[in-house]
Image (cartoon, rainbow, N blue to C red):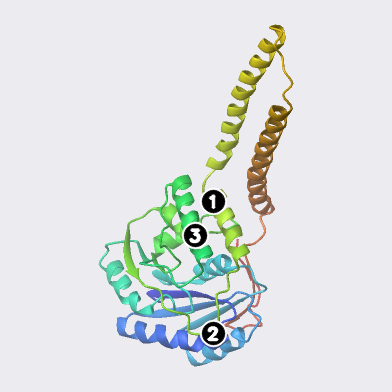
């Protein structure tokens, strides 16, 4: 069995596959450890799978999985983690924004038994629009406030000990947030810092709305505190209604009641907006429960290649 597994999700990175594998293997050969490479094609629409199969024929250490459709990066990472056989598993992106040159230092820390999780964090974010930067900073601040987990600068570039991988696999969530789940696990951890490289080809695969959806799923998966906001709104308006109602009765019985069209309109608008906000918060949690209760597989594997795999004999597979 390999000492080290390197797992990377692939989505429409056909032009990048060989470059990525060459860079990673050059680093791993210098580490003098037995290793395997696990690539997971997340339903690519280009020639990524064909390139992966070609490379698996040239590289005995390479195993490739193809998901039946695009399940998302988090699901592809889960497929790779469940397929990995090494005593330690490194996860990273295949666009080479995560520098493979950090892997030997990760391995050194792990072999010295200094940490069970070695996490590479960004010293600064890659080049992006001001809007993306603003919402990213807002998300990390809200996540830290609601969950007490600090993910500022965190990413998917990590080394996990086998015990950590098994603990991660034991979590049954269907809506996954890899970096949040590994932070929640605890274990001994060390941090390394790097500056992301520019993409060598293509563009980012995350649209603005995909990022918003991931942020909502991640926040609601790790914290129920937003629901307590509904209780606070309810208590506030209960107290507010007592004050306003008492004043209205006093004015009525004292004979000084006055028409208050503006006050009534404002009260209705504020109350209605608060009720709608409460419904929106509940709907996010209902959506989360909707996906979890169905208990569908996280992903489906349609093909495998490499490591002596017979794609006809073992074509199908499913993640929990």
- How packed is label 1: few (under 14 Cα within 10 Å), some, or many (20 or more)? many
Note whether 94 is above or below 79 in the view shown.
below
Residue 219 is labelled as 1
Can you tell which quarter of the image residue 123 is in? Answer: bottom left
Near-viewer residue (43 or 125) = 125
Residue 22 seen in the current view: yes
Residue 210, position as x, y percentages in the image: 61, 64
The picture places residue 304, in percent across and down from the top left corner, at: 60, 80
- Tell me which label, 1 or 2, sits earlier in the chain: 1
Estimate the x, y position of residue 35 in percent, counting from the top left.
40, 79
Q: Secondary structure at mark 3?
A: helix
**Badge 1 element:** helix
Mark 2 neighbour class, 10 Å CA radius: few under 14, some 14 to 19, many 20 or more: many
Eye-nearest disc, 3 or 2: 3
Quarter-of-image position of residue 30: bottom left
Disc assigned to residue 134: 3
Task: Compare residues 112 and 270 and report the one nearer the observer.
Answer: 270
The residue drawn where x is 67% and y is 74% is 68
Left or right, 280 with respect to 236, comes to right
Which element carries disc 2, helix, strand or loop? loop
State whether residue 250 is above or below residue 148: above
Image height check: is 40 above or below 15? Answer: above
- On the image, numbered disc 2 is attached to which residue? 306
């Amino acid at each position: 069995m390999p000492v080290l597994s390197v797992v990377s999700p692939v989505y429409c990175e056909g032009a990048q596959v060989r470059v990525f594998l060459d860079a990673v293997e050059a680093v791993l050969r210098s580490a003098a450890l037995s290793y395997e490479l696990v690539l997971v094609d997340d339903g690519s629409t280009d020639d990524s799978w064909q390139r992966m199969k070609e490379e698996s024929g040239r590289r005995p250490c390479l195993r490739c999985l193809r998901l039946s459709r695009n399940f998302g990066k988090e699901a592809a990472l889960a497929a790779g983690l469940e397929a990995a056989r090494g005593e330690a598993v490194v996860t990273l992106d295949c666009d080479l924004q995560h520098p493979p040159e950090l892997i030997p230092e990760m391995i050194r820390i792990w072999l010295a038994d200094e940490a069970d999780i070695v996490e590479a964090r960004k010293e600064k974010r890659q080049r992006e629009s001001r809007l993306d930067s603003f919402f990213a900073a807002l998300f990390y601040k809200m996540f830290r406030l609601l969950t007490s987990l600090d993910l500022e600068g965190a990413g998917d570039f990590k080394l996990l000990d086998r015990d950590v991988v098994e603990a991660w696999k034991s979590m049954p969530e269907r809506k996954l947030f890899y970096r949040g789940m590994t932070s929640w696990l605890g274990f001994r951890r060390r941090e390394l810092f790097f500056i992301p490289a520019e993409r060598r080809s293509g563009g980012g695969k995350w649209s603005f709305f995909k990022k918003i959806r991931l942020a909502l799923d991640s926040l609601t998966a790790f914290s129920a505190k937003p629901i307590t906001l509904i209780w606070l709104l309810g208590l506030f308006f209960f107290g507010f209604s007592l004050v306003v109602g008492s004043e209205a009765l006093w004015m009525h019985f004292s004979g000084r009641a006055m028409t208050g069209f503006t006050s009534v309109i404002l009260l209705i608008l504020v109350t209605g907006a608060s009720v709608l906000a409460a419904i929106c918060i509940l709907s996010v949690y209902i959506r989360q429960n909707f996906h979890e209760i169905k208990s569908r597989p996280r992903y489906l594997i349609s093909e495998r290649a490499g490591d002596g795999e017979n794609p006809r004999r073992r074509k199908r597979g499913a993640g929990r």
